[in-house]
């Protein structure tokens, strides 16, 4: 493998993005030394692709804490005390902790993803006694469960006795809550997302359009997270829903003396056809003008993707788009991102864009692998044309 420029070093040296160069990985990838070395070379931020999601930490079925006599422990609400499973995420955290101890001048940090999501949260979490056949609990009890869960997760990673304290620098507190239509919380609270896989979500079954749990998620996260951790609302297709996203974030912050949601995560699963670079740039400019810290959180660039298909298809379609087409798009998009950061009103938005996270290491491990969306192909040794384009774009600064 030829020696190639580090992504993190190029962004640090040559671009206006003075934040994190990130990648999403899964814990089992760290069994491969080549992958560990690739991560260390190119990135100073890691997102757990799945391991910090509620579905993984809570598990398929509840596990309860027991006392010395074998009786199930109960909390102040009369609920069984849950035992949370952090083992998969901790494998990634242990790798980072060990690296940071050996390399104090070249540390890796973590974006926490995600505390609250309508998807990938087990249905039993919303039911009486955590019984999958039980009735749904009331709003008050669910908010107490929500606070307890957020507290336990944050304190596991940043409590005073946590071995991982200081590694996480940001949390996606709430993920993908906006329906594609307009969001007007006072007039139409039902326009938050309330279905998943053609079924009502647990949140909707309990709150019935009341969106207080979204705001309270940020209240609880602010209560337990260290003050230097930035808290984000994260969503996809934000370039087509700028008004909707800003309406929701402003609703979360309404009545607060300081922003409890200080950042917007733009997921950015883009295609070379959709959105256009101009559409993406316009949205980014509006978010920056609103004064929110921006992180591009789930970036990939598909080619030969069925953009006309259903949301569930994620399908390859032979449109004869090439690596060269992808590289051309990547360069234009990255130039636009860096230009918008450079030209922002710094008195309104001092930090602007503070991180870019690629959603995967290489095409072979991508969730959209058939559509070749990343900077490395099936081999992690050899970068694609889009890798060169990605770094070349940084030279405009």
Image (cartoon, rainbow, N blue to C red):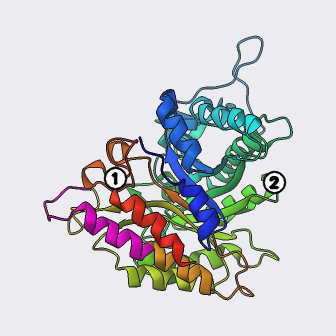
**Residue pointed to by mark 2:** 226
Judge left or right: residue 171 versus residue 275: right
Secondary structure under the numbered disc 1 in the rendered image? loop
322 drawn magenta: yes
* Residue 376 image point, x, y percent: 38, 50
Q: Which of marks 2 and 1 is nearer the N terminus?
A: 1
Picture mark count = 2
Judge left or right: residue 119 versus residue 140: left
Residue at figure coordinates x 67%, y 53% from the top left: 143
Discs 2, 1 touching: Cβ within 8 Å: no
Residue at figure coordinates x 45%, y 61% from the top left: 299
**Residue pointed to by mark 1:** 197
* Residue 396 image point, x, y percent: 53, 78
* Residue 370 image point, x, y percent: 24, 50
Q: Is residue 319 visible?
A: yes
Judge left or right: residue 123 versus residue 287: left
Quadrant where the C terminus lies? Answer: bottom right
> Which residue is the extreme one toward the front?
2
Mark 2 → mark 1, Cα distance in angstroms: 35 Å
Which of the 4 quarters of the picture holds residue 51?
A: top right
Camera-side residue: 323 or 47? 323
Q: Give the range drawn in magenta.
A: 314-333
Which of the 4 quarters of the picture holds residue 180?
A: bottom left
Residue at figure coordinates x 26%, y 65% from the top left: 324
- Bin the neighbour count of mark 2 within 10 Å (Cα to Cα): few under 14, some 14-19, many 20 and up: some
Secondary structure under the numbered disc 2 in the rendered image? loop
157 drawn magenta: no
Residue at figure coordinates x 54%, y 76% from the top left: 338
């Amino acid at each position: 493998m030829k020696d190639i420029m580090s992504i993190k070093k190029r962004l640090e040296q040559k671009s206006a993005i003075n934040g994190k160069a990130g990648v999403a990985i899964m814990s089992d990838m760290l069994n491969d030394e080549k992958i560990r070395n690739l991560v260390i070379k190119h990135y100073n931020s890691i997102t757990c692709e799945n391991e910090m999601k509620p579905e993984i930490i809570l598990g398929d079925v509840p596990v309860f804490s027991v006392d010395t006599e074998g009786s199930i422990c109960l909390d102040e609400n009369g609920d069984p005390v849950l035992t949370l499973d952090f083992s998969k995420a901790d494998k990634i955290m242990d790798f980072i902790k060990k690296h940071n101890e050996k390399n104090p001048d070249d540390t890796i940090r973590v974006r926490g993803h995600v505390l609250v999501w309508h998807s990938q949260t087990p249905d039993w979490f919303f039911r009486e006694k955590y019984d999958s056949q039980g009735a749904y609990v009331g709003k008050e009890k669910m908010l107490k469960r929500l606070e307890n869960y957020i507290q336990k997760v944050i304190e596991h990673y940043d409590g005073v006795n946590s071995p991982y304290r200081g590694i996480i620098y940001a949390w996606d507190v709430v993920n993908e809550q906006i329906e594609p239509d307009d969001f007007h919380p006072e007039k139409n609270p039902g326009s938050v997302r309330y279905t998943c896989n053609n079924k009502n979500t647990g949140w909707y079954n309990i709150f019935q359009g009341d969106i207080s749990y979204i705001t309270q998620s940020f209240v609880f996260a602010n209560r337990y997270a260290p003050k230097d951790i930035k808290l984000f609302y994260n969503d996809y297709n934000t370039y087509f829903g700028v008004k909707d996203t800003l309406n929701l974030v402003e609703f979360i912050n309404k009545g607060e003396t300081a922003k409890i949601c200080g950042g917007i995560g733009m997921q950015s699963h883009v295609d070379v056809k959709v959105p256009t670079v101009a559409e993406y740039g316009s949205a980014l400019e509006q978010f920056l003008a609103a004064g929110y810290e921006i992180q591009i959180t789930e970036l990939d660039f598909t080619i030969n993707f069925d953009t006309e298909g259903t949301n569930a298809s994620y399908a390859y379609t032979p449109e004869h788009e090439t690596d060269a087409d992808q590289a051309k798009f990547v360069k234009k998009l990255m130039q636009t991102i860096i230009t918008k950061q450079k030209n922002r009103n710094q008195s309104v938005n001092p930090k602007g864009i503070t991180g870019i996270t690629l959603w995967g290491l290489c095409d072979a491990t991508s969730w959209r692998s058939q559509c070749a969306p990343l900077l490395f192909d099936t081999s992690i040794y050899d970068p694609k044309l889009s890798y060169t384009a990605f770094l070349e774009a940084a030279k405009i600064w």
